[in-house]
Amino acid sequence: MIKKLIIIFFGIVALFLLVGFLLPSEFRVERSITINAPVEKVYPKVADLKQWRQWGVWFQRDPQMTVTYQGRVAAVGMKSSWQSDSEGSGEMQIKTLIPNKMMVYSLYFPEFEMGSTGEFEFIDQGQQTRVIWLDYGDVGSNPVNRYFAVMMDSMVGPDFETGLANLKVLVESN
């Protein structure tokens, strides 16, 4: 009986790993919102990483999060690093800025040895701004990480939605 249980257990583990190898390694999360304000009022709230504390959902969940900043404010190379017991640790660095049009950043989570690329696109619609926030990456060949890639949209997407809604309220209330 024990021998059968061991065989079944290892069979399930092998099946889990086999399926993991067949899953995609790449992921992409995308959300958007229209903010009733010109792009000149929206863009600075995103391009300055220090301002994320006002609208980022992770800061709301852990107001005690420790954050440090390096580099010039709202400039390529600006970096934020954070530590949180509930939200984890990581770092973000601005890679590209096109004022009032786009921001590209890199994310890295040392606890998981995983990273991704994020982008904000700002579409000027006169007195409104369409903000598109996306994050994408490749988790590599680890079959366990590939399960995370499949679930990334459902894990991160709601945070993007809440963050964008917070950004909308922040900008529209000023």
Image (cartoon, rainbow, N blue to C red):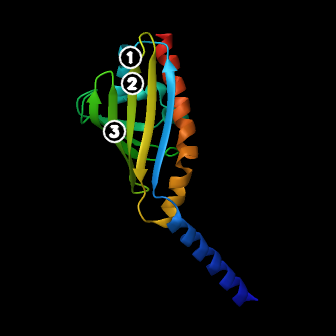
What amino acid type should be assigned to the residue bearing mark 1? Val
Which residue is pictured at 44% across the width and 56% down the height?
Answer: 112
Which residue is pictured at 44% across the width and 9% down the height?
Answer: 127
**Circle 2 sits in a helix, a strand or a loop, which is it?**
strand
Report whether 16 appears left or right of 79.
right
Are the residues at dot 1 and dot 2 in contact (C-beta closer than 8 Å)? Answer: yes
Residue 10 at x, y percent in the picture: 62, 80
Q: Earlier in the sequence, mark 1 or mark 3?
A: 1
Q: Work out whether 101 lies above or below 84.
A: above
Residue 111 at x, y percent in the picture: 43, 55
Residue that numbered label 2 is attached to: 122
**Circle 3 sits in a helix, a strand or a loop, which is it?**
strand
From mark 2 to mark 3, how far is it between C-alphas? 15 Å
Residue that numbered label 1 is attached to: 39
Say which mark, if any, is on residue 29. Answer: none
From mark 1 to mark 3, how far is it between C-alphas? 19 Å
Residue 62 at x, y percent in the picture: 52, 36
**Can residue 149 be spotted in the picture?**
yes
Q: Work out whether 163 lies above or below 6.
A: above
Say which mark, if any, is on residue 105. Answer: 3
What amino acid type should be assigned to the residue bearing mark 3? Tyr
Query: Closer to the camera: disc 2 or disc 3?
Result: 2
Pointer 2 local density, CA inside 10 Å: few below 14, some 14–19, many at least 20? many
What amino acid type should be assigned to the residue bearing mark 2? Phe
**Circle 1 sits in a helix, a strand or a loop, which is it?**
helix
Q: Work out whether 42 lies above or below 12.
A: above
**Looking at this view, is 159 or 150 the one in front?**
150
Report whether 166 appears left or right of 83.
right
Which residue is pictured at 43% across the width and 57% down the height?
Answer: 139
Residue 42 at x, y percent in the picture: 40, 19
The single residue placed furthest to the right in the displayed view is 1
Which residue is pictured at 54% across the width and 59% down the height?
Answer: 147
